[in-house]
């Protein structure tokens, strides 16, 4: 038996759509200084996907703990909770065909409400919240849907220019069905003026592309007297149908 | 106007940043109690079939300095060349081997080590067998889009010489950037982000 996909759908085996590298930030974005010595300069090697890129690991719902998608409580002492603006982040994992991607593992990490990360490399003077760790995870449902609860992260200054501030953001790591779909990105919040001043955001050349990383306030999903809600969809590479592929038997 | 294709565009990538550990390996950076273990730290158990090997990988920047805040994921076939994935239609892979691993580079040395097995050969899209290889994905602060590449094995000279992907590398002098050197049971592999020895990265 082939590995289970966490879905009743027939597994797809087509190659992924070519990645539009003009839509992503280029490797070298000099205003984000760390990219200068970490950006490859030679042309990448292009080839149509082989099974090594088309296949990918599957993570089952069984690995999830009860509080994995609740950053307000998953590091908090019993009976306590993280400090900050309570929010729900929800959306769908889709591919470029507009199809929901079920069984996708999403991992999230973020600063606390004051803009401080629980990490020894973060020396910002905003205090740690003893009840906030800053990580969470979820696996998308049959329609690609996911949701988690957290506090809104604060903006924070970072060593790049003399006075650069990151907009409030949540990091997303996403697995699709193939290893070539692997993606890390960041979610920003509607209305934050820091988005348009951030050298990391501005590495993305197209304003329309940046806008796809900005979550929208959704008052309909907001829970009265508890938490506001933000909607954020993630789009992974689409894939060809394998119906017409000229592949050898047993391949 | 003709019909719209109705496509979406892939979400643009953003760097994993310096605190990637919090999200992907929280136990490694001292955030305990949220997940029982970090995902991808153990790849093999007693029942996994295949030759046990170690991988010792570094990622070097344009000055030759190892990155101490990078994270590497690897993806590979089992000892028989089968992927543990729904997209694998040729048979059932070893149930004791997922084939996926994750490792942050050491915060002092920059070293990234995996205990795994040597993968079997997997066919390319034309049906010919590729040389044994492991797919790598590298993210870090300063890397705007995760980098894909492969690790091939120095003691597979004959298979490497017939590999369909290695054959596509126009500048043959760059082929060795994808070949890990065997030292005992460990393969040593340096990934150069820039410079004369820049690793061949993939757009696939």
Image (cartoon, grey):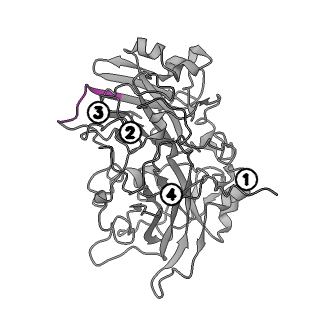
The numbered mark 1 sits on a residue in which chain? Answer: A
Q: Residue drawn at (57%, 65%), measured in percent from left and top? A: A168
Magenta-span inclusion, residue B50? yes
Which quadrant holds the C terminus of chain A? top left
In the picture of the structure, the residue carrying the numbered disc 3 is: B115
Residue tagged 4: A171
Q: In the image, are marks 3 and 2 on the same chain?
A: yes
Residue drawn at 61 percent across, 36 percent down: A39
What is the x, y in percent for residue A131? Answer: 35, 70
Q: Which residues are magenta?
A: B47-55
Q: Please report contact status of discs 3 and 2: CB closer than 8 Å, yes or no.
A: no
Whether pointer 4 and pointer 3 mark residues with C-beta atoms closer than 8 Å, the reply is: no
Say whether disc 1 or disc 4 marks the residue closer to the N-terminus.
4
* Few, some or many residues within 10 Å of mark 3 (<14, 14–19, 20+): some
The CA distance from mark 4 to mark 3 is: 28 Å
Q: Classify mark 4: helix, strand or loop.
A: strand
Check disc 2 and report the residue beneath it.
B89
Please give the chain letter of the residue carrying mark 2.
B
Identity of the residue furthest to the top in this view: B158
Can residue B159 be seen by looking at this rendering? yes
Camera-side mark, 2 or 1: 2
Secondary structure of the residue carrying numbered label 2: loop
Q: Is residue A114 something that shows in the picture?
A: no
Q: Secondary structure at mark 3?
A: strand
Query: Mark 1, residues whose alpha carbon is within 10 Å: few (<14), some, or many (≥20)?
Result: some
Residue denoted by label 1? A206
Quarter holding the N terminus of chain A is top left
In the picture as drawn, the residue positioned furthest to the bottom comes out as A225
């Amino acid at each position: 038996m082939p590995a289970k996909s966490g879905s009743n759908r027939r597994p797809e085996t087509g190659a992924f759509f070519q990645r539009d590298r003009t839509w992503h930030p280029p490797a070298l974005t000099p205003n984000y200084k760390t990219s200068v010595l970490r950006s490859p300069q030679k042309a990448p090697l292009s080839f149509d996907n082989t099974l090594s890129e088309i296949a990918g690991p599957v993570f089952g719902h069984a690995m999830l703990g009860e509080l994995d998608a609740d950053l307000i409580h998953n590091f908090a002492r019993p009976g306590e909770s993280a400090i900050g603006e309570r929010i729900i982040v929800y959306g769908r994992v889709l591919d470029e065909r507009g199809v929901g991607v079920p069984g996708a593992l999403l991992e999230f990490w973020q600063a606390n409400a004051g803009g401080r990360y629980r990490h020894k490399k973060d020396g910002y003077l905003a205090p740690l919240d003893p009840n906030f760790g800053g990580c969470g995870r979820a696996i998308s449902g049959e329609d690609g849907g996911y949701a988690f609860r957290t506090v809104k992260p604060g903006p924070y200054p970072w060593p790049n220019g003399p006075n650069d501030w990151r907009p409030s953001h949540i990091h997303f790591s996403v697995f699709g069905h193939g290893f070539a779909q692997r993606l890390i990105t960041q979610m920003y919040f509607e209305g934050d003026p820091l988005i348009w001043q951030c050298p990391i955001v501005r590495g993305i050349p197209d304003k329309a592309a940046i806008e796809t990383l900005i979550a929208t306030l959704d008052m309909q999903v907001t829970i009265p007297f508890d938490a506001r809600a933000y909607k954020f969809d993630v789009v992974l590479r689409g894939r060809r149908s394998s119906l017409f592929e000229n592949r050898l038997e047993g391949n | 106007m003709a019909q719209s294709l109705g496509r979406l565009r892939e979400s643009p990538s953003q760097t994993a940043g310096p605190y990637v550990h919090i999200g992907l390996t929280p136990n490694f950076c001292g955030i305990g109690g949220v997940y029982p273990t970090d995902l991808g730290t153990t790849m093999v158990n007693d029942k996994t079939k295949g030759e046990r090997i170690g991988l010792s990988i570094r990622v070097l920047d344009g000055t030759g300095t190892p990155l101490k805040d990078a994270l590497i994921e690897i993806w590979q076939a089992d000892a028989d060349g089968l992927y543990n994935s729904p997209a694998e239609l040729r048979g059932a892979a070893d149930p004791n081997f997922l084939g996926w691993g994750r490792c942050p580079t050491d915060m002092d040395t920059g070293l990234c080590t995996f205990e795994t097995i040597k993968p079997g050969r997997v066919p390319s899209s034309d049906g010919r067998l590729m040389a044994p290889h492991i797919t790598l994905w590298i993210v870090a602060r300063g890397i705007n889009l995760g980098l894909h590449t492969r690790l091939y094995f120095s003691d597979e000279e004959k298979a490497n010489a017939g590999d369909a992907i290695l054959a596509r590398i126009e500048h043959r002098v760059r082929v060795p950037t994808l070949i890990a050197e065997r030292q005992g049971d460990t393969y040593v592999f340096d990934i150069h982000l820039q410079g004369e020895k820049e690793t061949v990265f993939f757009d696939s």
